[in-house]
Image (cartoon, grey):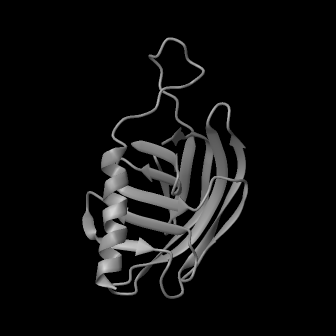
Amino acid sequence: MKSRLSGYLLIAILFSFISCSKELSKENNTGTQLFNGDFYATIDGAQWNADSLQLALLSNTGFSISGLSKTGEQITMLLPTLKTGNYTFNALSTPIAISSNLLVNLSTVYISNTGAAGGNVTISSVDSIKHLVSGSFMFTLINPTDNSQTSITAGIFNSLPYSVD
């Protein structure tokens, strides 16, 4: 179990380091203005906003959505594909959701694929021309080390730009 947790932590850290730059808007010809979609949620009753970093990446291994707040709180969702529809998270699911704070405590990682954790992501629209994705999410995530949990509700990502790897 510890090696699995280490793997999830490595994924969360990897996404935070890979995505140190923001993508330029495809609608902007000057190349000087950055485009970010809306990406926010409520974590344990407190408002969270991906105001520091937003990254969505489509690769041959799946689709990932990751956001980082200025306070270091990160939410990452790993999906098997980028298609509209509902993706369910539980102990037996392929999709994974991860939450951690990269500035406060790197050893505390909450995941969706353990015990009674779970939730869902709904991809409501994919614009494959402009490379924008929109949807909603909610989770109850568990830290497998001590079985503590965190609740992420009212999650929204709207017109979030994604890159293709």
Residue sitting at x 54%, y 41%:
162
Label count reads 0
Judged left or right of residue 131, residue 4 is left
Of 138 and 57, which appears nearest the observer?
Answer: 57
Residue positioned 51% across, 60% down in the render: 77
Name the image quarter holding residue 74. bottom left
Give x and y (percent) for residue 21: 36, 35
Apparent side of residue 136 relative to residue 59 in the rendered image (left or right): right
Question: Residue 51: in sight, yes or no?
Answer: no
In this rendering, the answer to whether 15 lies above or below 114 is above
Position in image of residue 127 (x %, y %): 69, 38
In the rendered image, residue 121, in percent from the top left (x then y), is placed at 64, 63
Q: Is residue 15 left or right of residue 105?
A: right
Q: Which quadrant is home to the N terminus?
A: bottom left
Q: Is residue 85 above or below residue 25?
A: below
Q: Is residue 134 visible?
A: yes
The residue drawn where x is 66% and y is 47% is: 134
Q: Which residue, as the protein is rendered here, is positioned at the far front?
A: 60
- Which one is nearer the viewer's eye here, 80 or 37? 80
Name the spot of residue 96 as percent of width and height, x first.
Answer: 51, 69
Residue 97 vertical placement versus 15 (above, below): below
Q: Residue at x 56, y 68 (%)?
A: 95
Task: Check the image and report above or below for 92 versus 131.
Answer: below
Residue 38: name its quadrant: top right
